[in-house]
Image (cartoon, rainbow, N blue to C red):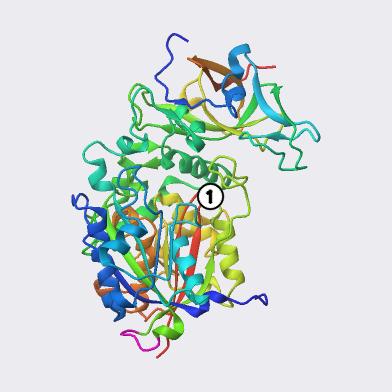
Amino acid sequence: MGDAPFRILPRVNDENRFFWMSGEDGRLRFLRCDECGFLVHPPSPICPVCLCKRLTPTAVSGRATVATFTVNHQPWIPGYDPPYVVALVEIDEQPSVRLMTNIVGCAPDDVRIGMPVQVTFEHHDDVWLPLFEPAAAE
Amino acid sequence: MSAIEVGERKAVISGIGQSEIGRRLHRTGVDLTVDAALAAIADAGLTRDDIDGVATYPGNMDTPPGFSGAGVNEVQDALRLKLNWLNGGLENPSQLGSVITACAAVAAGYANHVLCFRTVYEGSAQGDKGRASVTMGGGGGSFRAGGFMQWSLPFGAPSAANWIALYAQRHFHEYGTTREQLAQIALNARKNAQLNPRAIYRDPMSIDDYMDARMITSPFCLFDCDVPCDGGTAVIVSRAEAAADLRKPPVRVEAIGSAIRGRPSWDQWEDLTTFCLRDAAAMMWSRTDLKPSDVRVAGLYDGFSFIAMAWLEALGFCAKGEGGPFIEGGERIARVGGQVALNTNGGQLSGGRLHGYGFLHEACTQLWGEGGDRQVPGEPEVAVAAAGGGPLAGCLLLTRSRS
């Protein structure tokens, strides 16, 4: 994205690399338990449901729902100008998995709780940030 | 009440103290802390030689600047204390977790008189650059976020203001809560601050002032956010048997709450209309026969206005989701004539961000009848002090000693 704002990026390490680089092929991934299929986020060495330690990064649809949001007006970060929308989205496959993210592709005033959204990635260096935009009508 | 032993009843609060409090004092954290400590020790009628324990939150930390005024070791060394027990740390059931832990220490006989303190100098540390200057871990183009901040900072949400606004917005959505209702937390605090000579902001505030204030992160405006300041607060937690003949009849610890039964997380907590306050409050009530209707004075954390309303719900002053109607108009939380007198010192919103300990200090002040112009009438006998928000929560139910 040529018009991407300045971002403070996450520190990539062996535990989170799969997540932050996942968007390289346009897919969103979470750790999935090989035994019971539970999605584990943030990354952890163990499934909290069945205590299995075999977890595999697995692509999901990228569809999610806005659980809540705030329109930020405070200029916290030079180069990232308000207003912008910070949201918590719940992914379709397992709503207990939430991401804090930005809602892009619509005006801040048009964001609603319950709104269906779809992942889109913003590439910076070795990081693909998962942002979300209103889902296309089915 | 269950059959468990309520060990915290072996603990009392025997003295309280505060340093000078101000927006930007440009004094060191240790300097402020020793003033608060010596005031609390004198208030209890003790000397520093009697102090055999120290507890603090968050312990020694360099960043963010001004967040930790002093660690245990610095204070021990400055006052040459001889300790049997000490504890300082960030991973605690809130800022008041240090006090709760001190109650356990005296109940277990590890110490007789524990100096508990919390000091900040965030006002001076932030200078004229505002909160963002300290939230970014120093900032800079090459800085990268780790830990929890990796999930929030890249999306322009560095502040607890953003994270808590997400909860407030969901509460508004589910229960129809409004900004006009939430305003009462800020207006009540300001009204009380006008009677507290130590409060930071004492000018009158109207509902129009509130509604017209600039937005920080919806639904929070400027007046939903507490004011960074400099100051230290100390309380002395004593073993009840060791406090029988001290200067003042001690404040009794009736019950504590420290539970967190969901995920310890700002963004993965399952119920986006409450925090783990819910669990801490439930634990506290499980350890006493007293009821919310017995409580006359409540010091409830208001780092952001919504948290105080969430505590009102969690503690059962009103039902879950009914915080908005409960505070509407402000009468039920008023210092005089209210169902429960809320944040009688001005809270952190107007009194200054003393970070949790201010609420405990004020609860004791009111139970001792030392509130001066802001004293809650009727000699209050039961108070609650509660701190934390998000995945942090700790609360104490306190009672006045009967003479």
Side of A101 relative to B68 (left or right): right
Residue B184, percent from left and from top: 39, 55
Residue under numbered circle 1: B391
Residue shown at 39% from the left, 19% from the top: A6
Disc 1 is placed on an element classified as loop
From what the image shows, is residue A3 above or below residue B269?
Answer: above
Q: Which residues are magenta?
A: B244-248
Q: Amino acid at mark 1?
A: Pro
Q: Is residue B134 visible?
A: yes
Residue shown at 26% from the left, 54% from the top: B29
Q: Nearer the viewer, residue A50 or B230?
A: A50
Q: Main secondary structure of the magenta part?
A: loop
Question: Which residue appears farthest toward the bottom when viewing the image?
Answer: B403
Residue shown at 62% from the left, 77% from the top: B5
Question: Which residue appears farthest toward the top when viewing the image?
Answer: A2
Task: Look at the image and say whether residue B246 sits in the magenta stretch.
Answer: yes
Q: Nearer the viewer, residue B164 or A45?
A: A45
Side of B24 relative to B321 (left or right): left
Quarter occupied by residue B297:
bottom left
Residue B228, percent from left and from top: 29, 48
Question: Which residue appears farthest toward the left when viewing the image?
Answer: B26
Residue B130, percent from left and from top: 27, 38
From what the image shows, is residue B168 above or below residue B196?
Answer: above
Task: Look at the image and say whether residue B8 sits in the magenta stretch.
Answer: no
- Quadrant assignment for the C terminus of chain A: top right
